[in-house]
Image (cartoon, rainbow, N blue to C red):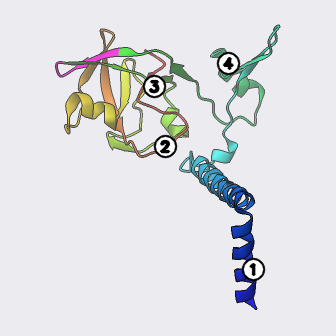
């Protein structure tokens, strides 16, 4: 019985080749699209899973009212302090600013332009406990001119050496390397370098 259905289907496909091709191509495209969307959603849901209490972390942004309604993913720095003072539900605040340009870094007789940098408060690693290849997250951003770099950036300048405690110049300003981040984190901020807000 099943064999008859199979033979009948094959004959029908042979008779209506164009129609059959469109049906099979549509089915293939639909299944492939569903698979790719599923893989994309699965990958997106992996980000920030290592952050304790990640469901209670919120990003504050401002909406500018003008001729064009625009949403800017930033807020004034003083907003963090007033937010914590006026809302008792807020347990901790953190100010993070992205560096939107390339900086010239110099170390070990090498000069390279690097991007994907951030400036943050000293409690950055309390909120986001990223894993360190060298150094540890405790108090790495407390002093001025403190910087944490990615393992990829450390390898470019220092090879396989531990660069913690060494200096690196960023646009002629000296920074002390306090830690090196591992590259394998699924983190929403692509941190290549991170330096203290007190700098």
Label 2, residues with CA under 10 Å away: few <14, some 14-19, many ≥20: some
Give the Cα distance between marks 3 and 4: 19 Å
User: Does the segment drawn in magenta span residue 154?
Assistant: no
Disc 2: which residue: 129
Mark closest to the chain's N terminus, 1 or 4: 1
Vertical side of 7 occupied by 51: above or below: above
Label 1, residues with CA under 10 Å away: few <14, some 14-19, many ≥20: few
Q: Quadrant of the C terminus?
A: top left
Q: State which quadrant residue 69 falls in.
A: top right
Q: SS of the residue at dot 2?
A: loop
**Residue at left 67%, top 56%?**
25
Q: SS of the residue at dot 1?
A: helix
Q: Is residue 154 left or right of residue 109?
A: right
Q: Tell me the tag on residue 116.
A: 3
User: How far from the left and from the top, in percent, is residue 44?
Assistant: 60, 46
Give the Cα distance between marks 1 and 2: 62 Å
Which residues lie in the magenta part? Answer: 104-109
Disc 4: which residue: 75
Main secondary structure found in the magenta portion = strand
Disc 1: which residue: 8
Check if mark 1's residue and mark 2's residue have beta carbons within 8 Å: no
**Residue at left 60%, top 49%?**
40
């Amino acid at each position: 019985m099943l064999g008859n259905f199979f033979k009948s289907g094959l004959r029908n496909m042979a008779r209506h080749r164009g129609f059959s091709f469109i049906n099979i191509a549509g089915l293939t495209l639909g299944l492939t699209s569903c698979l790719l969307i599923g893989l994309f959603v699965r990958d997106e849901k992996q980000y920030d899973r290592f952050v304790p209490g990640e469901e209670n972390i919120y990003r504050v942004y401002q909406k500018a009212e003008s001729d064009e309604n625009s949403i800017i993913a930033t807020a004034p720095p003083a907003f963090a302090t007033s937010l914590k003072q006026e809302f008792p539900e807020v347990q901790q605040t953190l100010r993070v600013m992205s560096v939107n340009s390339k900086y010239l870094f110099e170390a070990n007789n090498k000069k390279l332009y690097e991007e994907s940098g951030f400036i943050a408060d000293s409690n950055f690693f309390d909120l986001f406990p990223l894993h360190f290849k060298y150094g540890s997250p405790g108090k790495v951003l407390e002093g001025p001119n403190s910087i944490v770099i990615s393992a990829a950036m450390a390898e470019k300048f220092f090879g396989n050496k531990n660069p913690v405690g060494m200096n690196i110049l960023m646009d002629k300003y000296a920074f002390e390397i306090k830690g090196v981040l591992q590259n394998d984190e699924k983190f929403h901020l692509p941190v290549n370098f991170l330096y203290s807000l007190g700098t």
